[in-house]
Amino acid sequence: MANSRPTASKRQKERARQEKRQEKAQKKAQRKLEQEQSVAGERPAKLTVTYDEEGKPEGLNFHDF
């Protein structure tokens, strides 16, 4: 019976590891879903082109994207 204790302990530790991996995978999937939803909502439907006094299009800034 002395050998049954370490085996039960190992099983318990492995089960805890499996649960932790599963929780991490769920959190990762949730973050990915939230990121996809936020990126889709932030993008403008169309870029706005601005023109200078001469009628030439101005360059795009970093914030235009």
Image (cartoon, rainbow, N blue to C red):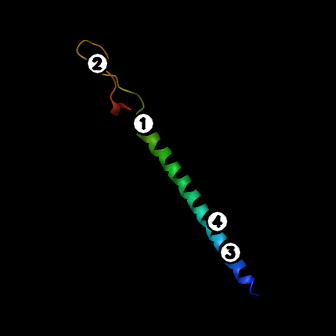
Residue 58 rendering spot, x and y as whole percentages: 30, 20
Q: Dot 1 corresponds to which residue?
A: 43
Q: Residue at x 50, y 52 (%)?
A: 31
Q: Is residue 57 above or below residue 19?
A: above
Give the mark, 2 or 1, whose residue is nearer the N terminus: 1
Residue 9 rendering spot, x and y as whole percentages: 67, 78
Residue 18's tag is 4
Give the mark, 1 or 4, whose residue is nearer the N terminus: 4
Q: Are dots 1 and 4 in contact, CB under 8 Å?
A: no
Label 2 SS: loop
Q: Dot 2 corresponds to which residue?
A: 51
* Kind of residue sitting beneath label 4: Gln
* Kind of residue sitting beneath label 1: Arg
* Kind of residue sitting beneath label 3: Lys
Q: Are dots 3 and 2 in contact, CB under 8 Å?
A: no
Give the mark, 2 or 4, whose residue is nearer the N terminus: 4
Badge nearest the viewer, 2 or 4: 4
Q: Is residue 11 above or below residue 42?
A: below
Q: Residues within 10 Å of mark 2 (few under 14, many from 20)?
A: few
Cα distance between the residues tagged 3 and 2: 70 Å
Cα distance between the residues tagged 1 and 4: 38 Å
Cα distance between the residues tagged 2 and 1: 22 Å
Q: Are dots 4 and 3 in contact, CB under 8 Å?
A: no
